[in-house]
Image (spheres, rainbow, N blue to C red):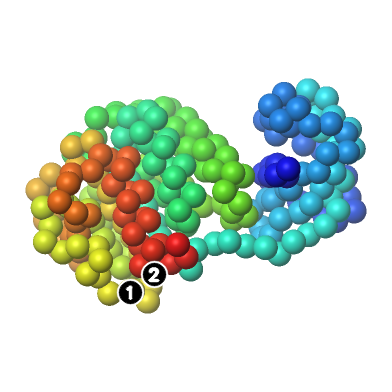
Amino acid sequence: MRIPRIYTDQTLICEQNIILENTAANHIHRVLRLKTGSELTLFNGLGGEYKAMIKSIDKRQVTVKVTHHNTKEIESPLNITLVQGISRGERMDYTIQKAVELGVTRIVPLKTRRCIVKLDEIRAKKKIKHWQKIIVSACEQCGRNQIPTIENITSFEKWLAEQHQAFNLILDPTATLKITELKKPSIAINLFVGPEGGFDDKELILAQTHQYTCIRLGPRILRTETAPITALSALQTLWGDL
């Protein structure tokens, strides 16, 4: 039986008891239906993972004893930032979830000219918190012990105006260069993906003036939630750990 993995932001020390509350406790009690004596794997994003055993449990809190630290890490050898044009609802959720599973280090939600989603400051903050939960859940599922960061929503122009020491790629279905024709970079990778409708011509031209390389993923135009997963899979197959 697969041992459930749970994220906590607490300090984890072997042979000490800690209390898991709120979302974690509810998930353990109501969803997983674990009992006293059940084993868990805990991680806090600070390195490795910890074996633990449930000492007591109810719907409000779960007390566990941390028993062993394992230095296991399954991080990709590639340092990839996904700069993703914001898409609607479940499409963006899906993109973030799968990007985490495919090993991205950082995610930057991007406002572009063709973005359908319009967020004021309050809604933007709620979205970031929502996406953070998706990232943590994806790490729990896929076995990662390092939590990818998600930046605040930024604009296309603001992102390009910043200095990025990276191998910069932007997806463009009209590009002539294929992803398989790229040479392996020795630095981090920034991958730009558009929202529904993609990037407009002015954005593509602006990106190229900032040394972004336009690449295509084949003869077919992919949806906004399909394109980043395909690109990340290709990069990990070419140079990473797939």
For the question of whether residue 129 can be seen, the reply is: yes
Q: Position of residue 177 (x, y in %)?
A: 16, 64
Marks 1 and 2: in contact by CB < 8 Å? yes
Rendered residue at 79%/32% (across/down): 34
The quarter of the rendered structure image containing the N terminus is: top right
Tell me which numbered mark, 2 or 1, is placed earlier along the sequence: 1
Q: In the rendering, which numbered label is found on residue 215?
A: none
> The residue under label 1 is which amino acid type?
Lys
For the question of whether residue 83 can be seen, the reply is: no
Q: Position of residue 229 (x, y in %)?
A: 36, 48
Q: Nearer the viewer, residue 130 or 139?
A: 139
Number of other residues with Cα within 10 Å of mark 1, as a class: few under 14, some 14 to 19, many 20 or more: few
Q: Position of residue 90 (x, y in %)?
A: 39, 30
Rendered residue at 22%/54% (across/down): 217
Q: Is residue 150 above or below residue 185?
A: above
Image quadrant where residue 31 sits:
top right
Number of other residues with Cα within 10 Å of mark 2, as a class: few under 14, some 14 to 19, many 20 or more: some
Residue highlighted by disc 1: 184
Q: Position of residue 76 (x, y in %)?
A: 50, 63
Q: How many marks?
A: 2
Mark 2: secondary structure: helix
Residue highlighted by disc 2: 239
Rendered residue at 77%/36% (across/down): 20
State the CA–CA distance, disc 2 to disc 1. 7 Å
Q: Is residue 106 above or below residue 95?
A: below
Q: Is residue 87 above or below residue 108?
A: above
> The residue under label 2 is which amino acid type?
Trp
Q: Is residue 92 above or below residue 228?
A: above
